[in-house]
Amino acid sequence: MLHTAMELHHIRKSYGRADGPVEVLSDVSFSLAPGETLALTGESGSGKSTILHLIAGLDRPDGGRIVVAGEEITSLPDRALARLRRQHIALIFQQYNLIPSLSVAENIAFHARMARGLDEAWAEALTDRLGLGELRDRMPDEVSGGQRQRVAIARAMALRPALLLADEPTGNLDETTSDQVMAALHDLVAEIGCALLLVTHSGKIAAGMDRHLHLSHGRVDQA
């Protein structure tokens, strides 16, 4: 049994600009236990999405250590990093990132199938529980924004990930739909037992999480 789903140790990250490097993260450390939910807030440009990209192995830190599902990823070669990401990490974005040429059902199964971990019965159950049963053959542009986000949640959960990263997952939704999407997300996170790190600007959503950290001036503090 893993003691942590994710750990950040003294992470630093800068980006180059014409007038010199800009430090985004100066000393970020926190961890997430399996089954724990955490909200990350902060001003636009404070580095919240950067943290998600680093944890997902989509970018690399300038310094510090990152551990996901018991494995340090900071110095993993690209192929090993891609394997770990496929097997243990799922992502949900504000813009859904569905594949427009695939149906709702095909989108839900896509990542789990790529990771060779598709449980068709579980994917089917997710489709029904998220109210997508009658939409399984439709294309993404034939369903509403709230329904697309439910597809994105089902696609992420089809993997049964150890760690779920969500970047403003309700940012494009009205309040009622946002509440419905977050309720479904919390239910599935609790059932699977995965850790959830969610970036949000919503105080209401942050208040519904187990913990809340605020990112400012390259560091995180308890909110």
Image: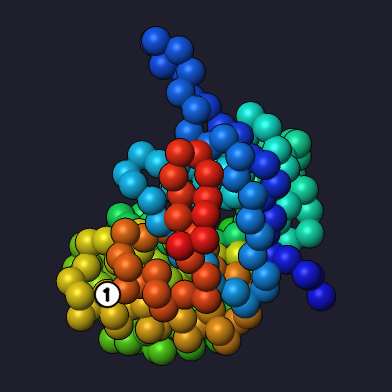
Residue 161 is at least partly visible in this image: no
Determine which quarter of the picture holds residue 45: top left
Residue 108 vs residue 145, the one in the foreground: 145
Residue 136 vs residue 152, the one in the foreground: 152
In percent of the image, x 40 and y 89: which residue is there? 128
Secondary structure category for the residue under label 1: helix
Mark 1, other Cα within 10 Å: few <14 / some 14–19 / many ≥20: some
In percent of the image, x 40 and y 41: which residue is there? 46
What is the tally of numbered marks visible in this picture? 1
Using the image, determine if residue 93 lies above or below residue 18. below
Q: Residue furthest right?
A: 1
Residue 44 is at least partly visible in this image: yes
In percent of the image, x 46 and y 49: which residue is there? 215
**Which residue position holds label 1?**
178
Using the image, determine if residue 23 lies above or below residue 195. above
- Quarter holding the N terminus? bottom right
The amino acid pointed to by label 1 is Ser
Residue 7 at what x, y percent from top left?
69, 55
In percent of the image, x 41 and y 89: which residue is there? 129
Residue 139 at what x, y percent from top left?
27, 66
Q: Residue furthest front?
A: 222
Q: Residue furthest top?
A: 19
Using the image, determine if residue 127 lies above or below residue 110. below
Instruction: Give the left or right position of residue 148, taking residue 221 as reference.
Output: left
Residue 159 at what x, y percent from top left?
59, 70
